[in-house]
Image (cartoon, grey):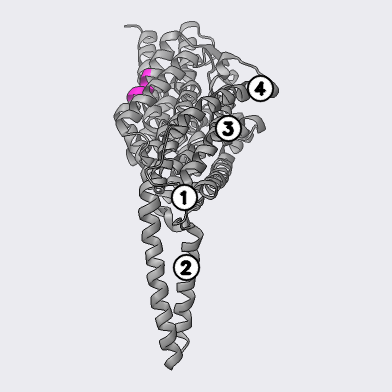
Amino acid sequence: MSPETILIILALVISFYMAWNIGANDVANAMGTSVGSGALTLKWAIIVAALMEFAGAFLVGSHVTNTVRKGIIEPVVFTGHPNSYIYGMMAALLAAGAWLNIASFRGWPVSTTHSIVGSVLGFGIVFSGFSSIHWDTVSQIAASWVVSPLLSGTISFLIFCLLRKMIFYSKTPVKSAQKMTPFLVFFVLGILTLVMVFKGLKNLHMDLSLYDALILASLIGSIGALVSIPLVNRINSTSTEENHDDHIDPKVEKSMLKVVMHLRRVKESTTGELSDEVTKILDSSEKISNQLEKYTHIKHVSTDYLTVEKIFVYLQILSACFVAFAHGANDVANAIGPLAGILSAVSSGVIEMKAQVPLFVLLLGGLGIVIGLATWGWRVIETIGKCITELTPTRGFAAEFGAAITIVLASKLALPVSTTHTLVGAVLGVGLARGLNSLNLSTIRDILISWVITIPAGAGITIVFYYIIRYAFTGQFA
């Protein structure tokens, strides 16, 4: 077997390994909140994500891709050194895959794009020194550690607060949800269409202007809204919404809790007969507060609120499908981009800045993502869906929708964002809307640490693999 054949086979295996790890780690961006909220079981999340991810990767994945992702270093510096370029790209893919493997095992949601960026960065430093690196690009990518979660967290926080005020604090939550659903469907389909145009379908070269994209998004959103009206009107609350006399506004319950708190303070600062009177009032107030809490829980959580959550199950699944499709179309390039460069260099000896992607390579990337999701995807899905904060379909929808809006804004404003960081930030924003104590701070700490070390970890591991691969094929380290 010739050395070229061995290189091609090894490159295909390593690329598949990278795609497998993309599926294991990154697909949780689309399905983590759906599983955590109970909108989908893990089994159905894997089935739905597998179909949408593969469709995105295979049908609209890039047929012409950057050989070195994100412009960290120019391939031209490798001119005259095709073998070093091949060894370096193989080392970068293997290192990125290895780091993602470690992160997935630990349940850390990290950016696959940042992983390959860090790996290519390490190879570039070894081969041509620090001066060949586009540090301005690297700094922009590092800025996404702050930009992505902050922006998506703020948007998701506001969305959830709006839903809570307009629906859950309403006297008739189900009817309020039915009135809002067509508008929500319009914006969801509109925003997700923009995500597809700007992020997921860019490989089809649909160079639509912002005006044309907005018209298309509005048209699709309007059709979806009209379809949703008769469907959502079929949903009825299991409680008797017609009788509003016994409705208790949630604000009353909160006010009563404040009354109890203030009475306890008064009791602590009084003595004698006045203290006895305050105690009687306090006991009565506590009983009323407890009754209000039980009444609200029994009447609304078990009936109206559950009905509202059922409505949002469909909205969340819809948004998750769009995000999965866009992810498959866009991020499969993290596995096949370097591979395309390797295949081009092996076959022609020419190092190209952009390379054609054979159909079987797209198939390989799509299959790798699906298998990675099916075998190890549950680990990161659990972290996003269950370990950061408690999710319901409403909260999951707010997070998913907030992340989608962030991706659209970032795409048009040229802000460096990571899909992973965006979704995690959105989940954090929804959690913060219910108070800091609703967040699992230890999990958040581990995630933030994993983000910071992703690029240096990829760079360091690449350097080790580069020398190992070079020695295996040439018998020398330098």
User: What residue type is disc 3 on?
Assistant: Phe
Left/right of residue 105 with respect to residue 212 in the rendered view? left
Inter-mark Cα distance, 2 to 1: 24 Å
Asked which quadrant contains residue 295, the reply is bottom left
Mark found first going from the N terminus, 3 or 1: 3
Q: Residues within 10 Å of mark 3 (few under 14, many from 20)?
A: many
Left/right of residue 212 with respect to residue 225 in the rendered view? right
Tell me whether circle 2 and circle 1 mark residues in contact (CB < 8 Å).
Answer: no
Percent across and percent down for residue 45 are 35, 30
The residue sitting at 66% across, 33% down in the picture is: 413
Mark found first going from the N terminus, 2 or 4: 4
Inter-mark Cα distance, 4 to 1: 34 Å
User: What residue type is disc 1 on?
Assistant: Gly
Q: Residues within 10 Å of mark 1 (few under 14, many from 20)?
A: many
Above or below — where is 156 with respect to 209?
below
User: What residue type is disc 2 on?
Assistant: Met
Which residue in the protein does label 4 denote?
215
Look at the image and give the residue range highlighted in magenta: 367-371
Tell me whether circle 4 and circle 1 mark residues in contact (CB < 8 Å).
Answer: no
Mark found first going from the N terminus, 2 or 3: 3
The residue sitting at 39% across, 61% down in the picture is: 293
